[in-house]
Amino acid sequence: MGRKSSKPTSIERRKFLALSGAVAASAMMEFGIDRPASAAGESIVGIMPGVVLPKGAREIVEGTTGVKVENAPYVSPTDTVAKLLAPGGTSRYDLMISVTEFVKGPVLGQKAGDEKVRPFDMAKIPNATDLQPVFKQQVQVRAGKTLMIPIFYGFDSPLFRTDLVSEQDARTQTWGLLFDDKYAGKTALRDDAYQSIVVTALTLGHPNPATMSIGDLAEVKKFLISKKKNFRTLWTQFGEAVNLMSSGEVIAMYGWMPMRAALQRNGVKVTNAWPKEGVLLWNQAAFIPKDSPHAEASEKVVNAMLSSEFGVALAKESNYGPVTQKAIAAFSTDEQKKLGLDVTTRGAKLYSMQWPSDMNAWIEAWGAFKAA
């Protein structure tokens, strides 16, 4: 079921520690998570975006498995890998979920035996047989062992207030909306080196930002600095971003599907753009740190997350896409279009997130932009 993963890029452990802002130095505080007691049932500690387990979806997972999921702080894919690679990371957490193409290199290592994760017992994850064909191709297999399984998918795009920015404005059809002088002081990027540099590079016409040269990266940094005055802020937290848009302090920003969902539920007139340069398409996969003390409980949770009930609940609450065939079939064609669940079939240009050739240089460029 699935293909062998491509040979991942060799990335030294020190690079990931740098990405998380000296993870090792702060490990005692950051990772000082009391493992949940198991007296009242099984529990696991997981690293995953909080929006993966909204109330209804969490009730399905915990109710069907009897396993309580304790969410440790989630920051980003790079931070997730830094946590995994930090001293004690492979035993401190039971389950991790993050962007498949982005993290698989360091998670799997270069060759068999280098993996930082343990294989799944697929007999305990029968729901994986219902994966849509496109996501079966994203299952990461090595030497006959399944190491990463997609759980959900989505895309990132510009979000904008339709009552403050006309949908007929051609600027809404490009990532350039976030940089345009017309909306100076009213836009926001995410405070994330990778995602913000990707969309800036796409705006400047680089079709594959991950392969940019150092010279191209320097031009991207120069452009970012020249447009810094146009950004109201760089958001870091989900709630912060939603509040910025809800209040009208920001009228367009780099956004996530569940942000659109939260704003629309609150009556805010907002939609996502379909930029000509492409939306950032991704899927997130589950993997179990190799020394997890609660691997079997984690497998129960993963199987529940692949149920059609979970997929439907997640899509309705967060607007993230379900990876199973039964879950997607539960939505009509109109519902799929409204929620953006037709992203792979509607003809939109797509950019798949992938690890840059020199992430350290990207981190340095982003730091220079912020300091300018």
Image (cartoon, rainbow, N blue to C red):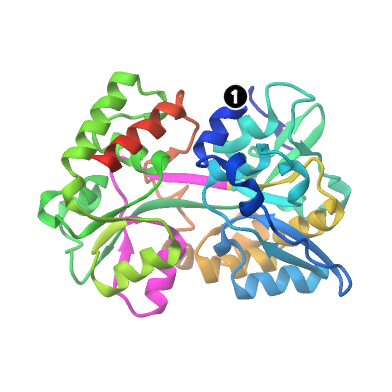
Q: Look at mark 1 in the image and give the residue it sits on.
A: 12
Tell me: residue 168, above or below residue 37: above
Residue 139 highlighted magenta (yes or no):
no
From which residue to which does the magenta span run?
254-283
Horizontally, residue 272 falls left or right of residue 314, namely: left
Residue 194: horizontal and vertical position, in percent?
Answer: 42, 39
- Residue sitting at x 23%, y 64%: 251
Q: Nearer the viewer, residue 131 or 265?
A: 265
Task: Decide if residue 244 is on the left or right side of residue 45.
Answer: left
* Mark 1 nearby-residue class (10 Å; few <14, some 14–19, many ≥20): few
Which of the two residues, 340 or 51, is positioned nearer the viewer here? Answer: 51
Membership of 262 in magenta stretch:
yes
Residue under the point 67% across and 49% down? 96
Which residue is drawn at the image coordinates 51% and 34% (left, top)?
18
Residue 204: give x, y in percent of width and height: 23, 33
Could you tell me the amino acid type at mark 1? Glu
Label 1 residue SS: loop
Count of residue discs: 1
